Amino acid sequence: MSPPCLGRNSQERVASNVRIGPIQLRNNLIVAPMAGVTDRPFRSLCKRMGAGMAVSEMVASNSLLWGSEKTIRRGNHEGEVEPRVIQIAGSDPEMMAEAARYNVDKGAQIIDINMGCPAKKICNVAAGSALLKDEPLVAAIVDAVVRAVNVPVTLKIRTGWSKDTRNALRIARIAEDHGIQSLAMHGRTRACMYTGEAEYDTIREVKRSVGIPVVANGDIDSPEKARFVLEYTGADGIMIGRAAQGRPWIFREIAHFLATGEHLARAQVAEIREVLVAHLHDLYGFYGHERGARVARKHIGWYTKGLRNSAVFRGRMNTLDDANLQLAAVSEFFDGLLAHSRELEYVDEGEVALAA
Ligand SMILES: Cc1cc2nc3c(=O)[nH]c(=O)nc-3n(C[C@H](O)[C@H](O)[C@H](O)COP(=O)(O)O)c2cc1C
């Protein structure tokens, strides 16, 4: 679907901020929850680079897991710019309520309920997007969580279970009736997983039918697409996941474009190098040097994808276990880029390899 011409009121629409209960967001650009990605270092970075809110990786509602290192780390929001949002996943209303209380006690300012994740691990225990099949259970979970805490509760869903059962509209009404303060919608069904293109018609329909803020999600990867989705769906905000991987500055690019209709100047190699190096130090500090270096690999891969000579660099970098060697390799790679250009230039790696 290509972006059509925008109406006159597009600037008003895109400039509006989102209010979630009593919490006014700085803007309407939200980092999507991504397990294995939206840890505290990444959320903090995206917020510094222009996102108005960032949702944590999901944490299990099963209290037996709360003592695990992984769950403790996922719930760690120390020093993070507000609002602190924790996403919880599970299928038992009482356990979900308990998880919400626990996370609020630990500092969460918004609780987000995951009914959007299609992962087998989550759906096989009838959580995540599997819950969309069972509307009474959706109501029971939302009700229990909303009653359990005195902070706003938000919900993230897909458009339905499959193309034949797109029940997002009914789910949205249930959510609103039971006190959900904002609804994020990924424009795919559970059956779609991540295939095909996200559709925005269902999001538009839902936005027209409920009074709570609606946040549109799915395949938003450029300032133009951001403006199109906001305009087309009428949504109050947008949520960005994969396009922010290795490109956290997409939030400031979108914010600038929405505010002015103009593109920000292309990112400079020197600045992105600084951003990446600071991100790496943050990861080493958060996970420890050894684990941090392993977690960092995928981020380095995303940052450098499409940059000159990056395929060869990534191959080498993935063999390095040591944080200092990793930092040195990154530094060397960026020196190579700077020798060509001050601006970040994405090239077709295949073509570069052929030309070399
Ligand atoms: C690696 C990865 C992990 C994800 N983990 C979660 C999660 O924990 N909770 C959730 O609600 N959605 C999760 N999602 C879905 C995203 O929040 C988002 O809905 C989806 O990626 C579509 O948005 P995008 O096209 O901007 O990436 C995940 C997606 C990815 C790619």
Image (spheres, rainbow, N blue to C red):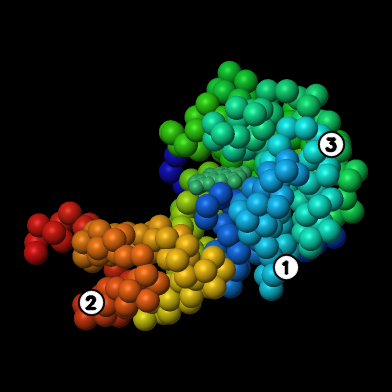
Res 307 label: none
Which residue is pictured at 64% across the width and 35% down the height?
Answer: 128
Amino acid on which the number 3 mark rests in the picture: Glu
Q: Name the residue carrying label 3.
A: 94
- Image check: 26 left or right of 346? right
Q: Which callout, 3 or 2, points to the residue nearer the camera?
A: 3
Quadrant of image for the N terminus? top left
| Residue 226 image position (x, y, % from top left) | 53, 54
Asked whether residue 257 is in view, the answer is no
| Residue 255 image position (x, y, % from top left) | 56, 66
Q: Name the residue carrying label 2.
A: 336
Mark 3–mark 2 contact, CB under 8 Å?
A: no
Question: Which of pointers 1 and 2 lies earlier in the amino acid sequence?
Answer: 1
| Residue 213 image position (x, y, % from top left) | 74, 48
Quadrant in the rendering for residue 355: bottom left
Q: Secondary structure at mark 1?
A: loop
Distance CA(mark 1)–CA(mark 2): 38 Å
Question: Which of pointers 3 and 2 lies earlier in the amino acid sequence?
Answer: 3
Amino acid on which the number 2 mark rests in the picture: Gly
